Every structure is written in C-alpha cells, then in structure tokens.
Amino acid sequence: MDAYAIFKQAEKMRVSDGAIVPLLSDCEWESRLLVLVWPQLGDFDTLEYAWWLQREALRIQRQGLVIRAVGIGDRASGQQFCDYTGFPASSLFVDPHAELHQKLNLRPGLSLKIPSLSSAQNAWLNLMLMCAGIGSSGTIAEVFRGYRGDKKAPQLIGEKEVVQVKPLPPVKGSFFNLAGGQGFQRPFELATLRLRNMVEVLSHWKTYVPDAAYLTQRGGTFLFNELGELLYSHRDPGILGFAADMSNPLSFLGLELSGDCLTGQHFADNL
C-alpha cells in the first residue's frame, strides 16, 4: 500500500475538537497536500519543523499548500504544542501509539533492550545513545552546526527580536552579530532556539510525552499533488534529521527564502 492510500484510510484524533476523523478530510480538491508524520510532539525535530513552518507561513499560504500533521501524543500534548508553536490545532492530529509511523515503515530509532529495564526506561537509554550519534545518522554534525553557524542558511532571529530562554537573560537578535555578522545563520543562533524548545518541553514533560515508549520513533515528510501522486518524500534517518537540507528544511517546496522572517498570525489559520 502506498503512502497516500495509508493516509486516505487513516482516522486520527483532531486536536482542535477531539473528534476522530479521516486524516485527509477536506483535502480532496487541493492542488498540493503536505502530510507531516512527526515523532513525539515534544521532540526536537517536531518543534523545530513547526518553527520553520511558522517562519514561512505567508509564503506557504501563497502557494495554496494544505498541511496535515500527525504527532505522537494525546490531545493535551497537541494543545500544548499548538499553544507554543502557533501550529493550527485544526491541522494537527495525534497518534498515541505511533501506529501510522509503523504502517509507513518509518525508522523506529535505536531499539536496544536491556531485560531488567521497562519499555520506557529502554526508550530513554536508546534516546540518550541516539543524541550521542549512535544509531542516529547526522545528529552530531547537526548539533555542531547549531553552534558554529551556517552561511548557507538564512538568519533565524530578527535584529530587533528578543528571545527569552529561562533562566538566561533575554537575548536580542542583534547580539548574534557579534559572533560573525548578519544575513545568515550566526554562531549560537540555532542552538539558542533549540535550547528554548528544550526548556519548553522539560517544563511540560508529562504533557508532551504521556508515553515514553516511543521516544526514539522518527518521522517523515510526504508531498502529494491533486491526484494523490507522491511528489516528494523524506524519511528521517535520526534525531535532527527531519529534512534532506537542514540549512533550508523547506527547500523541497520551492520557497525562495530570504533573511527576513515573514511570520503569519499563527500560520494565518490557512495551512
């Protein structure tokens, strides 16, 4: 069964109203459909992916692209995620047991098992090993990119934008100019955004991760035309590997990115 057929048959809980509905309801007549199958809603990749969608919301809206996302968690996880990222709750669905991920044969992540540990404890162990780059291709290199900067990537934080990462003092975007200039991803810029995401998740851990058994599960990206034909797909190889081009994760959409951030009113409720 191909990916579109799997999505067509899937019924999941919609975060906006808690209803169990077809994943692709109201998508039949759209010219392009982007389906995002995310890991845990509190995962590094999921939060960062949503940030990129928020950053490019107006450009995405101009393309007439419709987005449906499914993440591992429950409705409370989804509500917290939407409150934090601005992702529209009407476009987000939850899959508590990663059933859709398994049907799509997405990477489950490292799966070492120590008999004396519970499934959740084993998942934690495997997650820590993956964060260290074991069984998680490209993770370490991507972590370092967040600290050293990337001249192939756009500037991520506006000059006048203030980033609050407790317990650190507020940081103004222009501060990162001291590390190398402007108009591209400056050193420590991406690492700061990732730290903010980590603080958010750890502050609401039980909400974001109601079941730790799926901590290592990876996700995937699927883009279809109006006939349900697959135009593009990406299957995450490891942590911080949610895009083929991490310097420009949405390049497969043909977006012409600039250094400015055209964010749009919580995705303008149009995704």
Image (spheres, rainbow, N blue to C red):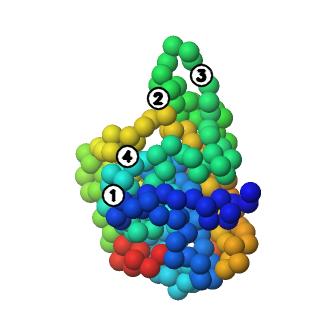
Q: Which residue is mark 2?
A: 120
Q: Which mark is residue 113?
A: 3
Q: Which mark is residue 208?
A: 4
State yes or no: discs 4 and 1 in contact (Cβ < 8 Å): no
Q: Which residue is mark 1?
A: 79
Secondary structure of the residue carrying tag 1 is helix
**Which residue is at a point 65% across and 49% down the rendered structure image?**
103
Q: Residue 198: horizontal and vertical position, in percent?
A: 39, 46
Q: Is residue 245 above or below residue 136?
A: below
Specify few, some or many for label 3: CA neighbours under 10 Å numbering under 14, 14-19, or 20 or more: some
Amino acid bearing label 2: Ala
Structural distance between the alpha carbons of marks 2 and 4: 15 Å
User: Is tag 2's residue or tag 1's residue first in the polypeptide sequence?
Assistant: 1
Residue 137 in view in this figure: yes
Structural distance between the alpha carbons of marks 3 and 4: 24 Å
**Which residue is at a point 46% across and 46% down the rendered structure image?**
96
State yes or no: discs 3 and 1 in contact (Cβ < 8 Å): no
Structural distance between the alpha carbons of marks 3 and 1: 32 Å
State yes or no: discs 3 and 4 in contact (Cβ < 8 Å): no
Specify few, some or many for label 4: CA neighbours under 10 Å numbering under 14, 14-19, or 20 or more: many
Q: Is residue 248 above or below residue 136?
A: below
Which one is nearer the viewer's eye here, 30 or 110? 30
Single out the residue that lies furthest toward the bottom: 62
- Quarter of the image holding residue 255? bottom right
Q: Is residue 212 above or below residue 233?
A: above
User: Is tag 2's residue or tag 4's residue first in the polypeptide sequence?
Assistant: 2
Single out the residue that lies furthest toward the top: 116
User: Is tag 3's residue or tag 2's residue first in the polypeptide sequence?
Assistant: 3
State yes or no: discs 2 and 4 in contact (Cβ < 8 Å): no
